[in-house]
Image (tube, rainbow, N blue to C red):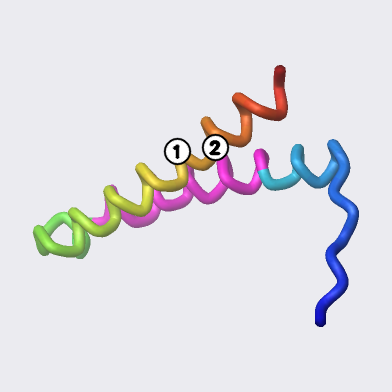
């Protein structure tokens, strides 16, 4: 069985930052890409990924920045 790491404020801040970074990258590098925009299914999936990262960022921030 894998031992669980101790998670402190630094770790939580790190995942807050990474969710923001990845949300931004998906938004600019995928959602705005012409190849994605030309395929409605891809565009929908890219937007779903962006929204999921936004929701994750908000959930982490709400708990971390109390």
Q: Is residue 2 above or below residue 24?
A: below
x and y, in percent, of residue 40 in the image: 9, 58
Q: Is residue 43 left or right of residue 55?
A: left
Residue at 27% x, 56% y is 33
Q: Is label 2 in contact with label 1 (beta carbons under 8 Å)?
A: yes
Residue at 67% x, 40% y is 17
Q: Is residue 41 above or below residue 66?
A: below
Instruction: Find numbered disc 2 in the image and state the secondary structure of the residue it sits on.
Output: helix
Q: Is residue 39 left or right of residue 58?
A: left
Q: Which mark is residue 54?
A: 1
Residue at 75% x, 41% y is 12
x and y, in percent, of residue 37 in the image: 16, 55
**Which residue occupies the extreme top position in the image?**
66
Q: Quadrant of residue 61?
A: top right
Residue indicated by mark 2: 57
Q: Is residue 9 left or right of residue 41?
A: right
* Magenta-drawn segment: 16-33
Instruction: Find numbered disc 1 in the image and state the secondary structure of the residue it sits on.
Output: helix
Q: What main secondary structure does the magenta stretch of the protein show?
A: helix
User: Tag 2: Cα neighbours inside 10 Å, few (<14), some, or many (≥20)?
Assistant: many
| 29 magenta-colored | yes
């Amino acid at each position: 069985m894998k031992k669980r790491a101790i998670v402190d404020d630094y770790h939580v801040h790190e995942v807050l930052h990474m969710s923001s970074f990845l949300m931004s990258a998906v938004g600019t590098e995928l959602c705005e890409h012409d190849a994605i925009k030309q395929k409605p299914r891809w565009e929908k999936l890219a937007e779903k990924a962006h929204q999921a990262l936004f929701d994750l960022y908000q959930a982490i921030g709400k708990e971390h920045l109390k």
